[in-house]
């Protein structure tokens, strides 16, 4: 044989050998997964415990407002970078007492940054462990936390906001979100 032709045949055979060895190596990796337990689970049907109980403390889920502890300072509204929080505070002309008349959060806009909850001095607004806000109508993600005027909370002089109870499982949000199927 001609030396050039002989080199071409040897190169061709080497390429075929490398191709089959590469395919065999890849198929061996794939075949090894046939005998392993699956890494995925069928959510939400096959969870051992509810996912909300498995989430770590500090998880930033859907925002919740406990209007009983709101002082009406509107810091959460002003720190929100995308303006998804709207608050209205009115003052009674006769008594001078201030009332919270609206506290709305548009969850469809919220980016869960946590700036509102970090700046709240009474921890009236905080993140829950709820995350599954699925609905067919985006209007259902607009949550109104005030139905009728609420007297603003007066923080005692020597008080700590850590004493204020929080419900991280979102009982208030579950009541207020329309069109949601919560268990």
Image (cartoon, rainbow, N blue to C red):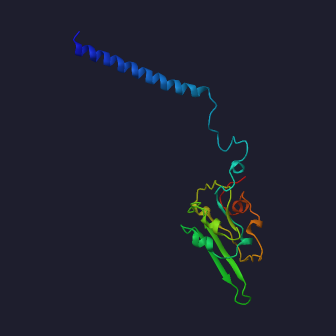
For residue 134, which quarter of the picture?
Answer: bottom right
Where 39 falls versus 177 (above or below)? above
For residue 89, which quarter of the picture?
Answer: bottom right
Residue 6 point in image, percent of width and height: 26, 13
Q: Nearer the viewer, residue 78 or 107?
A: 78
Where 161 falls versus 93 (above or below)? above
Residue 73 point in image, percent of width and height: 65, 76
Which residue, as the protein is rendered here, is positioned at the far left?
A: 2
User: Would residue 91 appear left or right of 107 to someone viewing this image?
Assistant: right
**Residue at 73% across / 68% down in the picture?**
161
Which residue, as the protein is rendered here, is positioned at the far top?
A: 1
Where 24 falls versus 46 (above or below)? above
Residue 173 point in image, percent of width and height: 69, 62
Which residue, as the protein is rendered here, is positioned at the far front?
A: 158
Residue 101 point in image, percent of width and height: 67, 77
**Residue at 72% across / 50% down in the picture?**
53
Which residue, as the protein is rendered here, is positioned at the far bottom?
A: 94
User: Would residue 175 appear left or right of 14 to someone viewing this image?
Assistant: right
Where 130 falls versus 70 (above or below)? above
**Residue at 48% across / 26% down in the picture?**
26
The quadrant in which the N terminus is found is top left
How many numbered circles does the render carry? Answer: 0
Q: Nearer the viewer, residue 57 or 179?
A: 57
User: Would residue 49 appear left or right of 61 to someone viewing this image?
Assistant: right
């Amino acid at each position: 044989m001609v030396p050039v032709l002989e080199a071409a045949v040897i190169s061709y055979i080497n390429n075929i050998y490398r191709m089959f060895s590469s395919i065999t190596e890849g198929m061996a990796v794939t075949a090894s997964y046939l005998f392993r337990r699956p890494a995925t689970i069928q959510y939400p049907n096959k969870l051992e415990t509810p996912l909300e109980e498995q989430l770590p403390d500090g998880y930033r889920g859907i925002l919740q407002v406990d209007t009983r502890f709101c002082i009406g300072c509107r810091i959460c509204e002003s720190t929100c970078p995308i303006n998804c929080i709207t608050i209205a505070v009115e003052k009674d002309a006769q008594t001078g007492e201030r009332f919270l008349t609206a506290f709305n959060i548009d969850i469809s806009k919220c980016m869960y940054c946590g700036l509102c909850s970090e700046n709240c001095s009474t921890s009236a607004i905080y993140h829950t462990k709820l995350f599954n806000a699925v609905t067919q109508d985006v209007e259902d993600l607009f949550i109104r936390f005030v139905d009728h005027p609420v007297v603003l909370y007066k923080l005692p002089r020597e008080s700590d906001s850590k004493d204020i109870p929080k419900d991280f499982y979102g009982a208030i949000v579950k009541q207020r979100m329309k069109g949601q199927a919560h268990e």
